[in-house]
Amino acid sequence: MTIHQKTILVIDDDPEICEALQEILSEYNYEVLTAQDTTAGTRLMEHKRPDLLILDIMMTTMQEGLEFATKFKAKEGGYGIPILIVSARPPVEKGYGRSIDEDMDWIAADIFMEKPVDPEDLIKNVKILLKEPLDQ
Protein backbone atom coordinates (compact mmCIF):
# COMPACT_ATOMS: atom_id res chain seq x y z
CA MET A 1 0.00 0.00 0.00
CA THR A 2 1.41 3.38 -0.99
CA ILE A 3 1.13 6.17 1.52
CA HIS A 4 0.11 9.45 -0.10
CA GLN A 5 2.78 12.06 0.51
CA LYS A 6 1.10 15.16 1.94
CA THR A 7 1.80 18.47 0.24
CA ILE A 8 2.32 21.65 2.25
CA LEU A 9 2.39 25.15 0.74
CA VAL A 10 4.43 27.76 2.63
CA ILE A 11 3.77 31.42 1.75
CA ASP A 12 6.23 33.82 3.39
CA ASP A 13 8.03 36.83 1.95
CA ASP A 14 11.26 35.83 3.71
CA PRO A 15 13.15 33.29 1.57
CA GLU A 16 15.12 32.11 4.63
CA ILE A 17 11.90 31.24 6.47
CA CYS A 18 10.62 29.37 3.39
CA GLU A 19 13.89 27.44 3.20
CA ALA A 20 13.95 26.64 6.94
CA LEU A 21 10.34 25.41 6.97
CA GLN A 22 10.97 23.39 3.81
CA GLU A 23 13.99 21.76 5.44
CA ILE A 24 12.11 20.86 8.65
CA LEU A 25 9.01 19.56 6.87
CA SER A 26 10.95 17.61 4.24
CA GLU A 27 12.63 15.61 7.02
CA TYR A 28 9.15 14.27 7.81
CA ASN A 29 8.56 13.29 4.18
CA TYR A 30 6.21 16.15 3.31
CA GLU A 31 6.32 17.62 -0.17
CA VAL A 32 6.88 21.33 0.41
CA LEU A 33 6.03 24.09 -2.05
CA THR A 34 7.04 27.67 -1.32
CA ALA A 35 5.90 31.08 -2.53
CA GLN A 36 7.15 34.49 -1.46
CA ASP A 37 3.87 36.30 -2.08
CA THR A 38 0.17 35.50 -2.17
CA THR A 39 -0.04 35.89 -5.96
CA ALA A 40 2.43 33.04 -6.52
CA GLY A 41 0.80 31.19 -3.63
CA THR A 42 -2.61 31.42 -5.29
CA ARG A 43 -1.22 29.90 -8.50
CA LEU A 44 0.31 27.02 -6.56
CA MET A 45 -2.94 26.50 -4.62
CA GLU A 46 -4.91 26.21 -7.86
CA HIS A 47 -2.46 23.86 -9.58
CA LYS A 48 -1.30 21.64 -6.72
CA ARG A 49 -4.17 21.63 -4.19
CA PRO A 50 -1.93 21.23 -1.11
CA ASP A 51 -3.10 19.44 2.02
CA LEU A 52 -2.01 22.29 4.32
CA LEU A 53 -1.19 25.98 3.99
CA ILE A 54 1.45 27.64 6.19
CA LEU A 55 1.13 31.40 5.95
CA ASP A 56 2.89 34.52 7.22
CA ILE A 57 0.73 37.52 8.18
CA MET A 58 2.97 40.51 7.41
CA MET A 59 4.28 40.47 3.87
CA THR A 60 3.80 43.31 1.36
CA THR A 61 1.22 44.81 3.73
CA MET A 62 0.68 44.41 7.48
CA GLN A 63 -2.29 42.13 6.91
CA GLU A 64 -1.65 40.47 3.54
CA GLY A 65 -1.61 36.98 5.03
CA LEU A 66 -4.81 37.52 7.02
CA GLU A 67 -6.61 38.92 3.98
CA PHE A 68 -5.41 35.99 1.85
CA ALA A 69 -6.56 33.45 4.46
CA THR A 70 -9.97 35.10 4.76
CA LYS A 71 -10.51 35.20 0.98
CA PHE A 72 -9.22 31.66 0.62
CA LYS A 73 -11.51 30.24 3.32
CA ALA A 74 -14.48 32.11 1.83
CA LYS A 75 -13.83 30.57 -1.61
CA GLU A 76 -15.24 27.04 -1.62
CA GLY A 77 -14.59 26.76 2.09
CA GLY A 78 -10.88 26.76 1.34
CA TYR A 79 -11.29 23.31 -0.24
CA GLY A 80 -11.17 22.09 3.35
CA ILE A 81 -7.46 22.89 3.54
CA PRO A 82 -6.31 23.81 7.07
CA ILE A 83 -4.27 26.99 7.58
CA LEU A 84 -1.38 27.34 10.01
CA ILE A 85 -0.19 30.91 10.48
CA VAL A 86 3.48 31.26 11.36
CA SER A 87 4.23 34.92 11.95
CA ALA A 88 5.90 37.42 14.19
CA ARG A 89 3.43 38.93 16.61
CA PRO A 90 2.33 42.20 14.98
CA PRO A 91 3.73 45.04 17.08
CA VAL A 92 1.17 47.44 18.52
CA GLU A 93 3.50 50.37 17.85
CA LYS A 94 3.21 49.70 14.10
CA GLY A 95 -0.48 50.45 14.20
CA TYR A 96 -1.75 46.94 14.90
CA GLY A 97 -3.79 47.67 18.00
CA ARG A 98 -5.11 44.22 18.95
CA SER A 99 -3.51 41.06 20.19
CA ILE A 100 -3.54 37.86 18.15
CA ASP A 101 -5.61 36.25 20.91
CA GLU A 102 -8.28 38.92 20.43
CA ASP A 103 -8.19 38.38 16.68
CA MET A 104 -8.35 34.57 16.53
CA ASP A 105 -12.14 34.83 16.29
CA TRP A 106 -11.87 36.42 12.84
CA ILE A 107 -8.47 35.21 11.64
CA ALA A 108 -9.26 32.50 9.10
CA ALA A 109 -6.64 30.11 10.43
CA ASP A 110 -6.74 26.92 12.40
CA ILE A 111 -3.56 27.44 14.46
CA PHE A 112 -1.30 30.45 15.06
CA MET A 113 2.40 29.99 15.83
CA GLU A 114 4.75 32.80 16.69
CA LYS A 115 8.14 33.09 14.96
CA PRO A 116 10.67 31.74 15.56
CA VAL A 117 8.95 28.36 15.64
CA ASP A 118 10.20 25.34 17.49
CA PRO A 119 10.57 22.53 14.90
CA GLU A 120 8.96 19.94 17.20
CA ASP A 121 5.96 22.20 17.85
CA LEU A 122 5.67 22.89 14.13
CA ILE A 123 5.58 19.18 13.28
CA LYS A 124 3.10 18.51 16.08
CA ASN A 125 0.74 21.22 14.78
CA VAL A 126 1.15 20.05 11.17
CA LYS A 127 0.25 16.51 12.21
CA ILE A 128 -2.78 17.77 14.16
CA LEU A 129 -4.04 19.74 11.16
CA LEU A 130 -3.39 16.87 8.75
CA LYS A 131 -5.08 14.45 11.20
CA GLU A 132 -1.98 12.27 11.42
CA PRO A 133 -0.86 10.26 14.45
CA LEU A 134 1.42 12.29 16.72
CA ASP A 135 3.60 9.34 17.69
CA GLN A 136 5.26 8.85 14.30
Image (tube, helix red, strand yellow):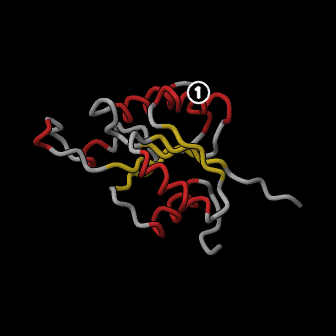
In the image, 29: left or right of 38?
right
Dot 1 falls on a residue whose secondary structure is helix
Amino acid type at image mark 1? Arg
Label tally: 1
Q: Position of residue 99 (x, y in %)?
A: 21, 47
Quick check: 102 above or below 20? above
Bin the neighbour count of mark 1 within 10 Å (Cα to Cα): few under 14, some 14-19, many 20 and up. few
Residue placed at 29% from the left, 30% from the top? 61
Using the rendered view, name the quadrant where residue 106 is placed.
top left
In the displayed image of the protein, which residue is found farthest to the bottom? 135
Q: Position of residue 51 (x, y in %)?
A: 63, 45
From the viewer's side, name the closer residue of 78 and 51: 51
Residue placed at 73% from the left, 54% from the top? 5
Where is the C terminus found, in terms of image quarters? bottom right
In the displayed image of the protein, which residue is found farthest to the left? 93
Q: Which residue is label 1 attached to?
A: 43
Residue placed at 27% from the left, 33% from the top? 62
